[in-house]
Image (cartoon, rainbow, N blue to C red):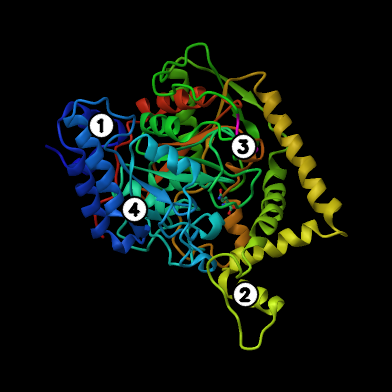
């Protein structure tokens, strides 16, 4: 039999059900891969006992002739933004070092209720702020990919869900959770040749997920293919009364609804996404994607999203504003790190703890956020950004009068080398140019691998859908997947 770690979620689920292999054998195979891949620094905490317990439950249920749960026997990786009961959760920040949540996030609970097991907690950009995983307080995640030209410079796995992308691409887990505030599922998926979907805002409960920017944060799956994403999203999503923005809707049967036939569908191509300086290879892949959509039966329409150029500036006001408020709770009193200098008072303790506990990028966001919310600047920045956000959402609404989904590149570049953009935060922010607008509008969006660049690195195509039309997004993604035939994978060097 082929290596069990080559199997994705559907294949593991089906194989365990059919008795082709045991869930414990699957868990063991991934645990071995995780233990051999320390060089990637994808895991902050390894929890083999959790994965084995879930696998044992699956095998026992099968032996007893019981109906197996949706994810029975499937071990996954959990981004460290999700609080996990009894398992250290830090959001890759020193300020939460040693924090052991006494509760489980709703998304992770949903996955365990569906029978999944946890291989460990995945490294990420600190508090999910970043696009390269370099803001983690516990060291960069390294992409398993290397350039084909013999250049062994370590590459960014994307961010902020870079532990998730690296682990899935390197076969350390068949799938992982991610979160996406401005692109953190889609951009790392694109950089590592995997698939990831951010659902409509409100589909997945934010309860127990460490908050970055609450009006934008959404959880979603990262996996090898579209079907695996559909299966996982079905388990992750659902109404939760503990999240005031959770949507009170039934979870559709996305897997059962999968179809790569796009007859009668219209695919919009936003002309403003042809940005200056985009590599010709990405243009070419986009054109290839358009041809694949046509081949799948879709009609192509050019559409306009005129406020696109304001999306990044608006996002980099709104997200830090919300972050500055959300991160006020880290004060050294309630969780994690406490720095209490000799003879210090309460204010000194707050200041010392926050100075010591937060990384530079997190501090930068708190400074920006506090500034744009301050009395004299609120209207000039925050109110203005909110107005722009409304205009961006309206652009999409108007576009969706003429088409069903949009097709764009996921990111304006392939994976860059670690360190390449670290000195210039703006250069890093620019990498989010294609993912941020749909986040501001709360729309479902996914990245699927389309091909490789001249250096042999993966490039992703993004599908953006109408609110609640994850099915349309998944189906367009499937149409690409069926035509791209993307089978490239990184060679094992770690
Ligand atoms: N790269 C973006 C940022 O740094 C998006 C992060 C995310 O989606 N969590 O804010």
Q: How far apart are labels 4 and 2 at the CA level?
A: 35 Å
Residue at position x 30%, y 30% from top? 10
What whole-number distance in Å separates the C-alpha atoms at marks 2 and 3? 34 Å
Residue that badge 4 annotates: 145
Instruction: Tell whether position 423 is magenta.
Output: no
Whichever of callouts 2 and 1 sits on the residue coming sooner in the sequence is 1
Q: Earlier along the polypeptide chain: callout 2 or callout 3?
A: 2
- Is there any visible trace of residue 167 in the rendered image? yes
Q: Is disc 1's CB within 8 Å of ligand 1?
A: no
Q: Position of residue 127 (x, y in %)?
A: 55, 57
Q: Dot 3 lies on which element?
A: helix
Q: Residue at x 44, y 28 (%)?
A: 477
Residue pointed to by mark 3: 438
Between discs 1 and 3, the one toward the N terminus: 1
Q: Residues within 10 Å of mark 3 (few under 14, many from 20)?
A: many
Residue 279 showing in the rendered view: no
Do the numbered discs 4 and 1 sit on residues whose CB atoms are within 8 Å? no
Residue 440 on image: x %, y %: 66, 40
Q: Earlier in the sequence, mark 3 or mark 4?
A: 4
Classify residue 419 as left or right of residue 373. left
**Residue segment shown in magenta:** 243-247
Give the residue number, with chain letter if any, for mark 2: 355
Labelled disc at residue 11: 1
C-alpha distance separating marks 3 and 4:
28 Å
């Amino acid at each position: 039999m082929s290596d069990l770690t080559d199997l994705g979620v559907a294949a593991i689920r089906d194989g365990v059900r059919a008795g082709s292999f045991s869930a414990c054998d699957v868990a063991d195979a991934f645990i071995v891969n995780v233990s051999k891949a320390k060089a990637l620094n994808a895991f902050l905490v390894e929890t083999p006992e959790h994965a084995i317990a879930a696998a044992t439950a699956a095998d026992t249920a099968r032996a007893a002739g019981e109906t197996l749960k949706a994810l029975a026997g499937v071990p996954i990786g959990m981004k460290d933004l999700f609080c996990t009961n009894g398992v250290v959760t830090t959001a890759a920040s020193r300020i939460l070092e040693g924090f052991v949540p006494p509760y489980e996030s709703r998304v992770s609970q949903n996955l365990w209720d569906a029978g999944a097991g946890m291989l460990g907690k995945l490294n990420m950009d600190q508090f999910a702020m970043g696009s390269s995983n370099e803001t983690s307080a516990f060291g960069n995640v390294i992409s398993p990919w290397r350039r084909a030209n013999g250049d062994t410079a370590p590459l960014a796995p994307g961010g902020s869900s870079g532990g998730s992308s690296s682990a899935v691409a390197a076969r350390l887990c068949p799938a992982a959770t991610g979160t996406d505030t401005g692109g953190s599922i889609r951009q790392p998926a694109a950089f590592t040749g995997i698939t990831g979907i951010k659902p409509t805002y409100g589909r997945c409960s934010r309860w127990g997920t460490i908050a970055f920017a609450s009006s934008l944060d959404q959880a979603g799956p990262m996996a090898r293919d579209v079907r695996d994403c559909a299966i996982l999203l079905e388990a992750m999503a659902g109404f939760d009364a503990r999240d005031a923005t959770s949507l009170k809707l039934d979870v559709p049967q996305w897997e059962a609804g999968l179809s790569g036939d796009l007859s009668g569908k219209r695919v919009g191509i936003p002309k403003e996404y042809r940005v200056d300086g985009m590599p010709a290879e990405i243009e070419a892949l986009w054109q290839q994607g358009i041809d694949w959509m046509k081949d799948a039966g879709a009609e192509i329409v050019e559409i306009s999203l005129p406020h696109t150029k304001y999306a990044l500036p608006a996002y980099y006001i709104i997200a830090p504003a919300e972050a500055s408020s959300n991160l006020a709770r880290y004060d050294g009193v309630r969780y994690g790190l406490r720095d209490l200098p000799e003879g210090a008072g309460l204010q000194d303790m707050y200041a010392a703890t926050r100075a010591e506990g937060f990384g530079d990028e997190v501090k930068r966001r708190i400074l920006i956020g506090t500034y744009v919310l301050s009395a004299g600047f609120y209207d000039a920045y925050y109110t203005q950004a909110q107005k722009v956000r409304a205009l961006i959402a309206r652009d999409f609404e108007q576009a969706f009068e003429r088409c069903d989904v949009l097709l764009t590149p996921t990111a304006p570049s392939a994976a860059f080398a670690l360190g390449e953009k670290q000195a210039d935060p703006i250069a890093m922010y620019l990498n989010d140019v294609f993912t941020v607008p749909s986040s501001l509008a709360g729309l479902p969006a996914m990245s699927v691998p389309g091909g490789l660049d001249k250096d042999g690195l993966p490039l992703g195509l993004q599908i953006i859908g109408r609110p609640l039309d994850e099915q349309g997004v998944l189906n367009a993604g499937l149409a690409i997947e069926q035509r791209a035939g993307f089978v490239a994978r990184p060679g094992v060097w770690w």
